[in-house]
Amino acid sequence: METADLLAAGFVAPSELLLNYTFRTMLIGTVLVGSFSGAMGCFLYLRRQALIADVIGHSAVFGVAAAFVIAVAVLGVLGRSMVTLTIGAVISSSLAAFAVNWISGTRLGSDAAMAGVLALFYGSGIVLLRSASLSSLPGRGGIETYIFGNAATTTHEDLLVIAVCGGAALLTVIIGWRAFGLFTFDPVFAHTLGYRSAVLGPILGVATTVAVVIGVKSVGLILMVAFAIMPAASARQWTGSLRSMVMLAGSIGGAAGAVGSYAAVSFGRVPTGPIVVLVLFTVFLVSVLFAPRRSVIGRAMRARRNAARLAVVGGNGR
């Protein structure tokens, strides 16, 4: 069945979805992005740097626009290549993250640092992106769609870039698992054991940045903060182990990508990224409400039981 027929059909069987090239690549792309960003987002979540993911996503707009302009106008190569855009996004987002960390050490504080850096990079990126779309540069048409993403345009080259970049980021963390784990929970203790924070911080920062920006084409730059944080926040409700949390967050992100892709096709002409985010929020809400140890309902029930026990003890004491 052709793409247009699938969109017009409404409900589509999963087997039929997998036989269509466009939606097969879209499905694989969103699953990969959800898995890598979900797993790597655990380190941002545990270090209480959830808003850094937002800075990374918005700052990548400038990198995408700059990479496109430089590739086409200066180098004379294909500006909309996934490799080109990913390199630009990683450089821009890494610079933004380092700028936030540097400014946070001054009297301005982290909140002002994130607000200022986000405004600078995102504002500059929007201006450059708009200028590029209005110019005569070849391949400029639709460049602004990278802000919100378009998973249906995912190609085999895009899948390869996502798999290689995301896999490299995850492999980096796996190789230095003990060091990164200690650094995440207690940087001071990690330093006393001989691990250098000045080395671990930038490496982990670049790895998480790569995991966030690989969704530039399929999900969009704006929604990537949800892909990085919501799976981690959901997984944290179910487990207290870092290893289990990373695995569960990656699984949640990948599963949400699959469900969201299928739902986007079944509902018709609905953007994939927002649907996946809604699925992630549903999982997060269920986790917050019903996780055995950390859920809101569980805590309320335990508090009620404890209050009842105290009342019984107090009554017996009389």
Image (cartoon, helix red, strand yellow):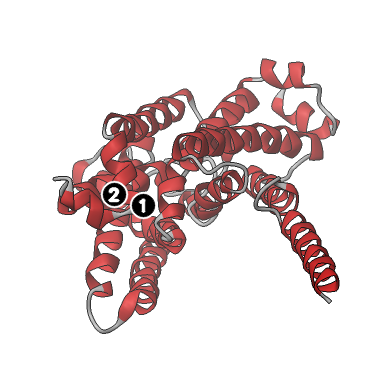
Give the residue displayed 78% in from the left and 39% down from the top. 268
Viewer-proximal residue among 225 and 174: 174
Q: Which residue is denoted by mark 1 in the rendering?
A: 185
Q: Is residue 134 visible from the viewing direction of this image?
A: no
- Which mark is on residue 183? 2
Percent coordinates x, y for residue 136 in the rendering: 37, 54
Is 31 situated above or below 280?
above
Q: Amino acid at mark 2?
A: Phe
**Picture quarter containing residue 265?**
top right
Quadrant where the C terminus sits is bottom right
Q: Amino acid at mark 1?
A: Phe
Give the residue displayed 64% in from the left and 27% down from the top. 23
Percent coordinates x, y for residue 78 in the rendering: 32, 37
Percent coordinates x, y for residue 299 in the rendering: 72, 58
Give the residue displayed 26% in from the left and 66% down from the top. 101
- Which mark is on residue 157? none
Kindly indicate whether the residue at mark 2 contacts the one at mark 1 (C-beta within 8 angstroms): yes
CA distance separating discs 1 and 2? 6 Å
